[in-house]
């Protein structure tokens, strides 16, 4: 049976390829670059937005770039994003951190003694490290303690019980609360009570601290796209359906079942009569290289994965790499895929957390803060749990930090961050001015001349910020999301692969995790059809340690 059974009116050379990548964010661009690196040019990238980068977007403010999305290169050692930045002259090899002076103030404008702030910060870091040890050391927490928030609050309560003065306890408790709010922005959640205690240590922190890119994180995108032809990235192509087991494939598969079986395999193969004899007598060792997916497949149902965009166009491919963010999968996974994703994937999507973290940038025409101060921590009094969010959303802002002398940055997370998206920037701006006047005890703090707020929950192609492991979820849920799908048990190569920060079990929530996941998806396509045995020879434990570190840092 020939190609006349395919929808020839929609299928053409321009929208048919070997590998189709959904999403031109970090994972998608990484996958495309890795394909090119391995000699594979037959791919198309579909991007829903009118820009590339996904959650990476830098804009100019006050003659410098600010990050609406990804903010830092998280760590240096073993971080491929840092290596790209270094190779392209985007960061200096010698990173001299700026002096950092943090002050903390209460609602009545009183500044907390630095010694007290330092004491509680040190205790908090210790408590957080203990939380990580449950995953790393595999021991059990106290009874009825399931979340990071519960554990830290328990430790804080025990820590504060030794203090005789109720005022001392109260002040220190406010600092603990502020640090927990900060942690929600780091972890990506509404409350640390949502983060599974046993899984906190699954996230691997790379050494070297957080590095800013002076020209903006978006500069990384230029490095990733310089070898990709612009014609391969189709913007404004939001995907509405991924048919990874199409009707025509099912028809051809029935015919395949009637074909002649190989003597040494239970697979049934229908030879493509249009292939030349030179193609059908290929070197048998080609199965261990990329040539097996770059040459035309032998089966008639090549290009039978159909991806439909919302503009009505259909695209066909042998393999699809889906980098759609977890937030969108939570909304649409049930209807996006045809047939439906396996139940284990749907359950993992449901269990994992994808909350919202938003930023507030305040631009001023003149400096007004002490030049030595780099950040003001806001020690809010505890709010009543039943307090209306419209009256309390701003209490989730845990600090304002200096981006420059005339540019401040505030962070907030969760439900309050989502509520802020419903407010006009003017309201956010005036609210922040009231906050600064209150905590600085200065009625002359100026109004900002410009206020920019992010709105990641509203964004239809992200629906939030980044992945976290919620109570009841586990690292294995991330591993489940990363698992590729095969059309049949006999297929040598997966037809549907997944990438994105939500698919990296150690570096979830990061740009380098997304980058590595894109490469990992392509490596699955590069993998030999028959697994090869690997043997490790080492003379001692030092060699073994080096080998393990090499695996952990592999990019």
Image (cartoon, rainbow, N blue to C red):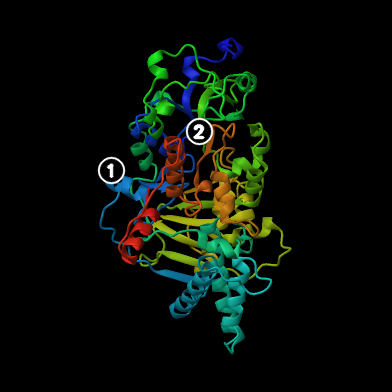
Q: Residue at x 57, y 34 (%)?
A: 486
Q: Residue at x 45, y 56 (%)?
A: 408
Viewer-nearest residue: 71 or 266? 266
Residue named by callout 1: 88
Residue named by callout 2: 492
Residue 464 in picture, x, y percent from top left: 58, 46
Any part of residue 57 in sight: no
Q: Residue at x 46, y 25 (%)?
A: 18
Return the disc, 2 or 1, that comes first in the chain's sequence.
Answer: 1
Q: Which quadrant: the N terminus?
A: top right
Residue 212 in picture, x, y percent from top left: 36, 53
SS under mark 2: loop
Task: Look at discs 2 and 1 and give the one toward the viewer.
Answer: 2
Residue 360 in picture, x, y percent from top left: 51, 52
Horizontal side of residue 51 vs 141, given as left or right:
left
SS under mark 1: loop
């Amino acid at each position: 049976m020939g190609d006349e059974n395919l929808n020839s009116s929609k299928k053409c050379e321009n929208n048919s390829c070997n590998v189709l990548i959904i999403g031109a964010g970090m994972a998608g661009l990484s996958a495309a670059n890795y394909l090119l690196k391995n000699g594979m040019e037959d791919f198309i990238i579909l991007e829903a937005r009118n820009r590339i980068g996904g959650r990476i977007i830098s804009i100019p403010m006050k003659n410098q770039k600010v990050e609406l999305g990804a903010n830092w290169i998280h760590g240096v050692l073993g971080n491929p994003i840092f290596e790209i930045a270094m190779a392209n002259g985007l960061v200096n090899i010698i990173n001299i951190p700026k002096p950092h002076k943090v002050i903390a103030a209460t609602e009545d404008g009183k500044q907390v003694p630095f010694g007290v702030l330092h004491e509680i910060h040190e205790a908090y870091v210790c408590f957080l490290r203990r939380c990580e040890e449950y995953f790393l050391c595999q021991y059990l927490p106290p009874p009825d303690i399931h979340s990071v928030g519960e554990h830290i609050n328990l430790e804080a309560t025990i820590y504060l019980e030794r203090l005789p003065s109720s005022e001392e306890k109260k002040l220190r408790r406010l600092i603990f609360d502020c640090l927990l709010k900060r942690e929600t922005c780091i972890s990506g959640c509404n409350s640390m009570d949502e983060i599974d205690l046993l899984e906190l240590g699954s996230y691997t922190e790379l050494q070297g601290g957080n590095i800013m890119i002076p020209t903006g994180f978006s500069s990384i995108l230029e490095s990733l796209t310089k070898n990709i032809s612009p014609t391969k990235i189709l913007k404004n192509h939001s995907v509405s359906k991924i048919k990874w087991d199409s009707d025509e494939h099912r028809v051809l598969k029935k015919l395949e079942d009637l074909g002649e079986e190989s003597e040494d395999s239970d697979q049934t193969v229908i030879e493509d009569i249009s292939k030349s004899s030179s193609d059908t007598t290929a070197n048998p060792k080609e199965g261990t290289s990329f040539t097996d997916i770059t040459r035309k497949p032998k089966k008639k149902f090549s290009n039978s994965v159909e991806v439909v965009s919302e503009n009505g166009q259909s695209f066909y491919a042998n393999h699809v790499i889906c980098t759609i963010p977890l937030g969108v999968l939570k909304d649409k996974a049930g209807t996006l895929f045809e047939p439906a994703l396996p139940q284990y994937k749907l359950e993992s999507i449901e269990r994992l957390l994808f909350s919202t973290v938003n930023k507030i940038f305040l631009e001023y025409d003149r400096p007004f803060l002490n030049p030595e101060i780099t950040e003001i921590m806001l020690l809010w009094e505890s709010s009543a749990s039943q307090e209306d969010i419209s009256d309390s959303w701003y209490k989730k802002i845990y600090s304002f930090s200096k981006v420059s002398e005339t540019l401040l940055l505030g962070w907030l997370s969760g439900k309050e961050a989502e509520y802020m998206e419903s407010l006009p920037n003017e309201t956010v701006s005036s609210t922040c001015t009231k906050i600064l006047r209150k905590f600085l005890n200065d009625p002359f703090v100026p109004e900002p001349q410009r206020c920019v707020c992010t709105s990641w929950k509203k964004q239809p192609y992200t629906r939030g910020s980044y992945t976290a492991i919620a109570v009841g979820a586990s690292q294995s849920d991330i591993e489940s999301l990363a698992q590729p799908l095969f059309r049949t048990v006999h297929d040598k190569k997966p037809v549907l692969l997944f990438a994105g920060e939500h698919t990296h079990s150690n570096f979830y929530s990061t740009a380098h995790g997304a980058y590595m996941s894109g490469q990992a998806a392509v490596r699955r396509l590069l993998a030999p059809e028959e697994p090869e045995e690997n043997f490790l020879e080492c003379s001692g434990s030092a060699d073994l340690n080096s080998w393990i570190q090499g695996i952990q840092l592999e990019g």
